[in-house]
Amino acid sequence: MHALLVTADVEPGREDEGLEYLRAMLPDLQQIPGLLSGYWLATTKDGESLAIVIFEDEAAAKEMAEIGLPNAPQPPGATFRRAEVREVVAQI
């Protein structure tokens, strides 16, 4: 398994708007090949948004990081900062 760590910046006051957009997109995200699960963490006070998305393998995670995310529509008030793929080495 591999994790895709996604960081974005959210404009102050637009957190709820972005969250509504995300919730509307969840059914589409569930159709992504190789995606096992995803966790979107609350935006920090300084506007940092973090998501952790788990994929079956490195190839699926890299494809999302290199092709899917850069070409995906951005949530209102959010700016994609970076995506990083890492191997999952333990879980409970």
Image (cartoon, grey):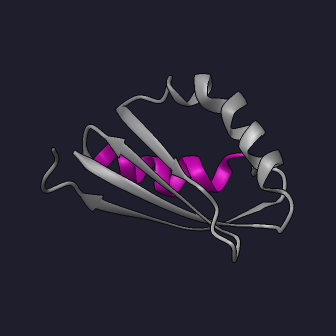
Image coordinates of residue 62 in percent, x first then y, are: 38, 53
Left or right of residue 76, residue 83 in this image: left
Q: Which residues are magenta?
A: 58-73
Residue plotted at (56% across, 46% down): 68
Quarter occupied by the N terminus: top left
Q: Main secondary structure of the magenta part?
A: helix
Q: Is residue 65 magenta?
A: yes
Image coordinates of residue 25 in percent, x first then y, are: 67, 31
Q: Is residue 40 magenta?
A: no
Image coordinates of residue 37 in percent, x first then y, are: 39, 35
Residue plotted at (75% across, 51% down): 74
* 53 or 39: nearer the viewer: 39
Q: Is residue 1 above or below residue 84?
A: above
Residue plotted at (63% across, 56% down): 70
Q: Is residue 21 above or below residue 80?
A: above
Residue plotted at (26% across, 37% down): 56
